[in-house]
Amino acid sequence: MISPSLHLYLALRPFVSSSLSPSVPQSLFFTILQERNSSFMECRPDCGACCIAISISSSLPGLPGGKPAGMRCIHLLDDYKCALYGKPDRPKVCADFKAEPEFCGRNRDEALKILSELSQ
C-alpha cells in the first residue's frame, strides 16, 4: 500500500522541478501540497512514541550502537520532547520521521502499537 504522502508526491512530481517557474513560487507549491495532503499532521504533544517504539541503527550521543526498538531513547525528555531536536547530532532517521496518522494513529497508545508492530 502506498502512503498518502508518496501517492501525492507521485501525482504532483510532473509539476515540480528543481527550478520552478517564476509564476509558481516554491512556497506556494508547498502550501498547496500541505493543503491537499491530509496525511500531514503536527507532532502530538506528550507522545514520544517514535522515540520509544522504533529502532535507531545509527550512532547517537550516548548510544554509539544505536537504540533497539521498544527502548526509550535516552534523549527523550520528561515532557516527551527530544533533547537533540534541531541539533546537528540528531540522527537522520529521527529528523526524517514525519508524523502521519498512518503511523501515529489517533492517540499515543495507538502510535506505540502501530510503530511497535512496524518495527518487528
Image (spheres, grey):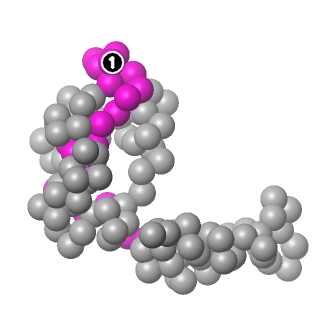
Q: Nearer the viewer, residue 119 or 103?
A: 119
Q: Nearer the viewer, residue 98 or 82?
A: 98
Q: Which residue is drawn at 17% across and 34% down?
A: 71
Task: Indicate the position of residue 115 as horizontal and vertical percent values.
Answer: 25, 53
Q: Which of 102 and 18 is in front in this view?
A: 102
Determine the secondary structure under disc 1: loop
Task: Indicate the position of residue 70 as horizontal and vertical percent values.
Answer: 17, 39
Does residue 42 show up? no
Quick check: 119 left or right of 30?
A: left
The count of marks equals 1
Position of residue 66 relative to residue 46, above or below, is above
Residue 101 found in image quarter: bottom left
Magenta stretch: includes residue 2: no
Q: Which residue is drawn at 49% across and 69% down?
A: 2
Which quadrant: the C terminus? top left
Which quadrant: the N terminus? bottom left
Q: Which of 34 and 112 is in front in this view?
A: 112
Residue reaching furthest bottom? 36
Q: How crowded is mark 1: few (under 14 residues within 10 Å), some or many (20 or more)?
A: few
Point out the stretch of residues depicted in magenta: 40-66
Secondary structure that dominates the magenta span: loop
Q: Which residue is drawn at 81% across and 59% down?
A: 18
Task: Indicate the position of residue 103 as horizontal and vertical percent values.
Answer: 31, 62
Quick check: 12 left or right of 118?
A: right
Task: Indicate the position of residue 39 as horizontal and vertical percent values.
Answer: 42, 74
Q: Which residue is drawn at 29% across and 52% down?
A: 118
Residue 83 found in image quarter: top left
Which residue corresponds to mark 1? 65
Magenta stretch: includes residue 49: yes
Does residue 20 show up? yes
